[in-house]
Image: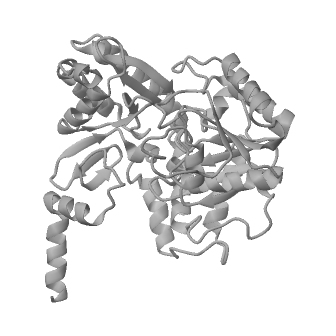
Amino acid sequence: MPRDDMTNQTQDAVMDAATITARQKHSVSNGIRNVHPVYMDRALNAEIWDIDGNRYIDFVGGIGVLNTGHRNPVVMARVAEQCERFTHSCFNALPHEPYVAVTDWLAENCPIEGPAKSMLTNSGAEAMENALKLARAFTGRTGVLAFEGAFHGRTLATLALTGKTKPYKTGLGPLPGPVYHLPYPCRETGVSVADAMDAIAKLFAVSVDPGSIGAVVIEPVQGEGGFRACDAEFLVELRRLCDANGMVLIADEIQSGFGRTGKMFAIEHANVCPDIIVMGKGIGGGFPLAAITGAEDVMNALMPGGLGGTYSGNPVACAAATGVFEVLETDGILNRAKQLGEKYATHISWLRDLPGGHVIGAMRGIGAMRAFELIADDGAPSPKRLQTLLQLARASGLLLMPSGEHANVVRLLAPLTIPFEQVDEAFAIIGKLLPKLAAVSDADDRS
């Protein structure tokens, strides 16, 4: 086929949703699931347009990636400038300044006690894998404590940390370990700090010597777990536990970092400094970048060559990150996250007073890292009403993201730069849908 004809055919296929769906079924693994069967054409800040020209308000935000919005002009300018210079260099072979610009910022802004050092990776899961390597190298121990409801990634080692079986662990057999899962103390679980500490004490008395545990890994606010905020007192107790037993405290801030909770990192709400912070998502402004920042002695535990990767710290992604850092400062994103969280809280309260508002359950989270539950008439979790809301909201021009231990929690992950009038528009859409949600019954699913 002549090249021009082939190009035209490809362009026609790309712009036809039905054709793309057929192609996807033919060539994409069934292990990949789409929350929204919408093919994006373009996006700007908190708005998306699909290939059919439909406009949506984006409350998914790349699952927490786009804190600074789609195609933020500062980020895009930094990217364009870098693309004019060079687009790739494996930092292990040939270093470049954009990588160091990112690590400089992390050393100054991450809540690590004493001198801090970093490494950059492509994804949050890769960052967590390397954090585990460093913890092993530093302590000489292999055991890890993690928590129920956690999500730390889909790679084999991070799956072992993830505290949820379906769909992540089903059919995979034994995973790398040893990993011990413990209750997560927060309002939603009803687990107190005393309960959680007792569970750790029992684990050490019955199952494992604390001298074999190298790391404790925790999300200060669980993401996939449904925006459950850990009791701040427990984070303080974990810091004491790690100090007393020579363990490395690893804070997973992949979803909660870079202003989402109203502080740069969620663990700062507890005034706790971890030994390692694992970051991703919001750091790159839509470009694939993640990072580990930790105490100097921990980060230096591996010999030269023990860390790295071909694309880790790609210069274009690093340039994007420097744009994100600029926006965080110049646009007052931390304060805006607090204002956005207050607006979410007001709107969620308003929804409950509308006809059908009894389907709205408890609000969760901190700052702009907010979520709300969908409940049945008897107050039980209602995943059926959540799925109905996702479909009806999408048809009305609003994209929402599910989560939670019972798949009934709506995460609000709009860019922190979203205009407030678009927030009002989004909740107005939800408000109009409440009577239809109230008409959905979970009885058939429970019988």
Q: Position of residue 228 (x, y in %)?
A: 52, 27
Outermost residue to the bottom = 2
Q: Is residue 296 visible?
A: no
Please tell me whether residue 288 is drawn above or below residue 87 in the rendered image: above
Please tell me whether residue 2 is drawn above or below residue 371 in the rendered image: below
Q: Position of residue 56 (x, y in %)?
A: 24, 42
Q: Position of residue 370 (x, y in %)?
A: 45, 28
Between 406 and 131, the one lying in front of the other is 406
Q: How is the image coloured?
A: one colour
* For residue 193, side relative to residue 371 (left or right): right
Q: How many marks?
A: 0
Between 364 and 204, the one lying in front of the other is 204
Task: Quarter of the image for the C terminus: give it.
Answer: top left
Please tell me whether residue 122 is drawn above or below residue 54 in the rendered image: below
Task: Tell me where residue 355 sits by quadrant.
Answer: top left
Q: Residue at x 79, y 49 (%)?
A: 141
Q: Is residue 36 visible?
A: yes
Task: Tell me where residue 241 sits by quadrant.
Answer: top right
Q: Residue at x 71, y 47 (%)?
A: 108
Q: Residue at x 84, y 36 (%)?
A: 245
Between 447 and 21, the one lying in front of the other is 447
* For residue 242, side relative to residue 93 (left or right): right
Between 72 and 374, the one lying in front of the other is 374
Task: Quarter of the image for the N terminus: give it.
Answer: bottom left
Q: Position of residue 169 (x, y in %)?
A: 49, 47
* For residue 88, side relative to residue 146 (left or right): left
Task: Tell me where residue 143 sits by quadrant.
Answer: top right
